[in-house]
Image (cartoon, grey):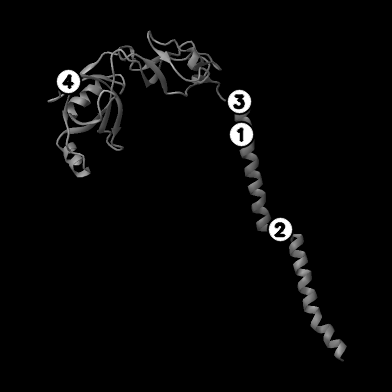
């Protein structure tokens, strides 16, 4: 991955109200972490950072960070996390991870597909994208912004697993090799569609029968008959007592 130059400035505003004013002035709060130095609060020009993201294939960006009035000329860093506003998508905060050129790093990279799967094009199947990110390890210069899978030859019932992916030079793909990344599923069989229709029809008939029973008066249940018999016995008891007195 080629590094991109980015200018940053030290930041003293840390309170919520102060950070809100900072964003309103066209700045983005940021923080850089690393083993060579402690965390440092920074701020970026929001337009410059937005332009940087617009020209990148993903949010995995390697930057040559120049911090104003910093003793070090440049700091190589990865964009580790970006917080976006949930409604308008604007960048709210950026975390950088300082790295060394000769030290391997582990990151998550997005997985994209290219081409139209044969099972979709000719067989009416559906392409299912199951795993959207892969964990990889490499030197910063070898990091890919994303991994693209060609699914053109994928037939119905076939899939691509983590272990099937050819990693770019200098890159190691981590994780369970048996995990499915993309697959082509078969279209629904006609029998399944017919079975679903039959089940729906049967449900309609049952509902119609219940409505008829309600309208015509259903036969009394056993519990109701016993209750009625009990009522008759209760009514008869006072009359029997009256006969004895006579």
- Residue 28 in the image: above or below residue 187: below
**Helix, strand, or loop for circle 2?**
loop
Residue in the picture at 86% in, 87% down? 243
**Helix, strand, or loop for circle 1?**
helix
Q: How many C-alpha atoms fall within 10 Å of the one at disc 3: few (<14), some, or many (≥20)?
A: few
Position of residue 188 in the picture relative to residue 60 (left or right):
right
| Residue 231 or residue 73, whichever sits in front | 73
Pointer 1 and pointer 4: residues touching (CB < 8 Å)? Answer: no
The residue to which callout 2 is attached is: 218
Farthest residue to the top: give it. Answer: 169
- Spatial separation of the CA atoms under disc 1 and disc 4: 68 Å
- Residue 209 in the image: above or below residue 147: below
Quadrant holding the C terminus? bottom right
Quadrant holding the N terminus? top left
Pointer 4 and pointer 2: residues touching (CB < 8 Å)? Answer: no
Q: Which mark is residue 72?
A: 4
| Viewer-nearest of discs 4 and 2 | 4
Q: How many C-alpha atoms fall within 10 Å of the one at disc 2: few (<14), some, or many (≥20)?
A: few
Q: Which mark is residue 196?
A: 1
N-terminal label among 1 and 2: 1
Q: Which mark is residue 190?
A: 3
């Amino acid at each position: 991955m080629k590094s991109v130059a980015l200018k940053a400035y030290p930041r003293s505003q840390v309170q919520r109200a102060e950070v809100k004013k900072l964003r309103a002035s066209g700045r983005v709060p940021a923080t850089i972490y690393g083993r060579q130095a402690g965390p440092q609060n920074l701020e970026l020009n929001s337009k410059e950072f937005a332009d940087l993201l617009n020209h990148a294939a993903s949010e995995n960006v390697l930057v040559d960070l120049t911090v104003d009035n910093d003793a070090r000329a440049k700091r190589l860093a990865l964009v580790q996390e970006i917080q976006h506003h949930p409604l308008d998508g604007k960048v709210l905060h950026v975390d950088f991870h300082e790295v060394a050129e000769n030290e391997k790093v582990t990151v998550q990279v997005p997985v994209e597909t290219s081409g139209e799967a044969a099972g979709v094009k000719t067989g009416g199947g559906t392409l299912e994208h199951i795993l959207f990110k892969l964990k990889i390890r490499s030197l910063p210069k070898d990091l890919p912004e994303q991994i693209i899978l060609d699914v053109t030859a994928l037939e119905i019932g076939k899939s691509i697993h983590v272990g099937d992916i050819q990693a770019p030079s200098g890159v190691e793909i981590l994780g369970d090799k048996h995990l499915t990344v993309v697959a082509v599923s078969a279209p629904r069989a006609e029998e399944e569609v017919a079975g679903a229709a039959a089940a729906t029809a049967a449900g309609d008939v049952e509902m119609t029968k219940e409505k008829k029973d309600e309208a015509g008066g259903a036969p009394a249940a056993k519990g109701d008959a016993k209750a009625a018999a009990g009522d008759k016995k209760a009514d008869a008891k006072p009359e029997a007592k009256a006969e004895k007195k006579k």
